[in-house]
């Protein structure tokens, strides 16, 4: 049997519309608990290859608001996965359909440096085509090394992301919390 590989595909012009549609469903479900809802991840960067999964970032002001979002998101079909990694500010949800992952929601209790970094990296990729091309090459390199291990894929990209964030001008750099 052939070994599975991470699926990285060319940019799909439908990704922004998919985000808008799903973001609207999420906003309607969680209402005023969300103070910010953003298209994040590689599908949010025009022209960048990506896993064909829409990443949505949601910012809330408190842990109580984060907990209040669980049931409404589950009612939309999202599976709540709890805290993600060792970041106490982040909660994670997935929406699967047709045997594959469709959407990932990254919910952050802000202020959170990880939220600021997620937006800063996305914005840097959008603003700098050379950085986006270098990131695409790094993603392909890493994917070829880690096969289907999504956690290893995320970890292996981290040095590139960290270097890009460290290189941002002071004005564009995420604020320290």
Image: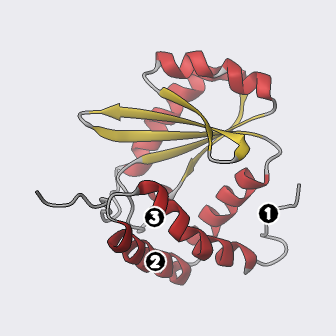
Q: Is residue 167 above or below residue 20?
A: below
* Gap between marks 1 and 2 measured at Cα: 22 Å
Q: At x 20% / y 60%, what residue is drawn? A: 3
Residue at the extreme left: 1
Q: Position of residue 167 (x, y in %)?
A: 73, 81
Residue 105 in view in this figure: yes
Give the colouring mode of the picture: secondary structure
Side of 76 where 31 appears, left or right? right
Q: In what element is the residue under mark 2?
A: helix
Residue that numbered label 1 is attached to: 174
- Residue at figure coordinates x 51%, y 69% from the top left: 156
The 10 Å Cα crowd at callout 2, few under 14, some 14 to 19, many 20 or more, is some
**Marker disc for residue 138:** 2
Q: Residue at (88%, 60%) from the top-left corner?
A: 176
> Mark 3 falls on what kind of element?
loop
For marks 1 and 3 on the same chain, the one whose residue lies earlier in the sequence: 3
In the image, residue 69 lies at what x, y percent?
A: 64, 22
Closer to the camera in the image, 75 or 23 = 75
């Amino acid at each position: 049997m052939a070994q599975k590989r991470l699926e990285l595909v060319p940019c799909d012009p439908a990704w922004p519309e998919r985000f808008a549609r799903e973001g609207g469903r999420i906003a309607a479900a969680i209402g005023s608990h969300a103070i910010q809802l953003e298209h994040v991840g590689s599908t949010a960067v025009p022209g960048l290859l990506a896993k064909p999964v829409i990443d949505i970032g949601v910012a809330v002001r408190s842990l109580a608001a984060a907990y209040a979002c669980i049931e409404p998101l589950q009612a939309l079909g999202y599976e709540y996965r709890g805290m993600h990694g060792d970041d106490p500010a982040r909660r994670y949800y997935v929406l699967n359909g047709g045997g594959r992952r469709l959407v990932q929601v990254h919910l952050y209790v802000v202020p959170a440096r990880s939220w600021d970094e997620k937006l800063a990296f996305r914005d840097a990729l959008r603003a700098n085509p050379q950085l986006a091309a270098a990131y695409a090459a790094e993603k392909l390199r890493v994917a070829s090394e880690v096969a289907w291990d999504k956690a290893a894929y995320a970890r292996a990209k981290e040095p590139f992301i960290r270097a890009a964030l460290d290189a941002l001008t002071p004005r564009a750099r995420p604020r320290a919390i």
